[in-house]
Amino acid sequence: MSVNKNRSSTVYLNQLITNIPLRQKIADQNDRDKFEWNQWQSATKAINNVEVSPKEKHVRNLILGTFRLEGSRLFWSMMIRINIESHPVIGWKFCYIIHRLLRDGHKNNGVQQNYSLLSYRYCNLIIAKLKFHERNPIFTGNLTMNEYKDIRRLFNDNFNSYFQLCIELFDYMEAILNLVQVIFKSLDQSRSNSMTAAGQCRLNPLIVCIQDSSLLYDYIVKVLFKLHEGLSGDVLQDHRQRLIDQFQRLKCFYAQSSTLQYFSNLIKIPVLPENPPNFNVKEDLKNYQTPVAIVNTSSSDSSQVMEDLLIDISDDTKSTLRATFSDNLLENETMYNRAQDISDLEQTLLQYDTMLKQNRSETDDLHRTIVIKDAELIAERD
């Protein structure tokens, strides 16, 4: 019998993946423990503070683990124990492993899962905001301008600077509208609404989006009017078309938000006109009205709860309470003593809570030290 010595012994990752049965349950607890321990070993050997590249065998094992479990829940639970923020090399290796899992791992590692697409779009928005402020330090974090009240006087008659600024304003607005789109789409898919806890969890960031988008739209309109003073209409055709597209999406965003009860007491949502301004007509600038979003900061969540409780108490109930306190001084004194006892207990509880936080902090430090020492020991063994 002849043996082909030139035959490669390499087993490719996709060959291993095809041999893994989907939804294979780990019936035996010992097998489950062994599998999880094996994954943990690969995770700590691939993601540690030793400045060497992760070994491919450990990376492959983590990838195969996502196919075994049809997702990356185990991986993320392990990442909590690794303390990614504790060392820059750990953070760097973590990014590489995530890249590999998204590229080669099970499909449920990606943006199909629950909040993944929402978080992805939110991260894009944050990056767009950081880039915008890095390039335009004249704008504060809340998009007001430090020294200038009119954006049309920012660069005098330097139309090249206005042209570039307009593009960056468009990009910032695009990131906001993309996040808005996936938030509303996720509500439709999950059958949540604005008066459920899950719905409000997703809708809450839109308050900031309404604030920022109203300012961005105002800046874009004024910059475009400025550009039309010095550049031909043909040069600005793409800018005008981009504004029209964003105007329609923004108008839909405001209209849809206005129908949700959740926003009714939190923010005054701007109302956009039927059509965007005509930049070829200078009179449209005089008729243009700046959209204003006003956030209601008069009451906090806790005060609102108290207000609701007060509303629920009728006048008859209040009268009954007054009569009770007036007619029974002994009971009133007893209630006062109980209130004093409660206050003393709360003070004691705060003291214990402070001590508990200190103990937790010390425990966390010990855990970090153990993980670091464990990683160093594993690296030495390898």
Image (spheres, rainbow, N blue to C red):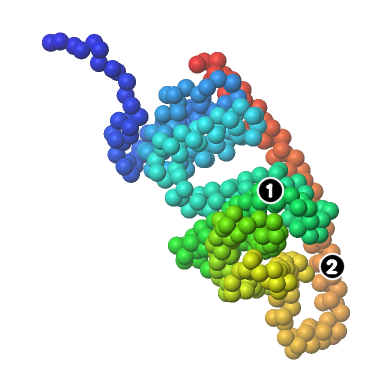
- The residue carrying pointer 1 sits among few (fewer than 14), some (14 to 19) or many (20 or more) residues within 10 Å by Cα, namely few
Proximity of marks 1 and 2: CB atoms separated by less than 8 Å: no
Residue shown at the point (75%, 40%) measured from the top left: 358
136 or 318, which lies in front? 136
Question: Could one spot residue 334 in this view of the protein?
Answer: yes
Q: Is residue 190 left or right of residue 362?
A: left
> In this picture, is 318 found above or below 157?
below
| Rendered location of residue 298, percent (x, y) | 78, 69
Specify the label residue 160 is tagged with.
1
217 or 7, which lies in front? 217
| Rendered location of residue 158, percent (x, y) | 74, 49
- The residue carrying pointer 2 sits among few (fewer than 14), some (14 to 19) or many (20 or more) residues within 10 Å by Cα, namely few
Question: What residue sits right under mark 2 in the picture?
Answer: 337
**Location of residue 48 by image quarter:** top right
| Rendered location of residue 310, percent (x, y) | 74, 78
Q: Secondary structure at mark 1?
A: helix
Nearer the camera: disc 1 or disc 2: 1
Q: Secondary structure at mark 2?
A: helix
Q: Quadrant of the N terminus?
A: top left
Q: Is residue 106 left or right of residue 323?
A: left
Whole-number angstrom distance, CA of label 1 to CA of label 2: 74 Å
Under mark 2, the amino acid is: Asn
**Location of residue 296 by image quarter:** bottom right
| Rendered location of residue 377, percent (x, y) | 57, 19
Question: Could one spot residue 346 in this view of the protein?
Answer: no
How many numbered discs sit on the rendered protein?
2
> In this picture, is 62 found above or below 250?
above
Under mark 1, the amino acid is: Asn
1 or 99, which lies in front? 99
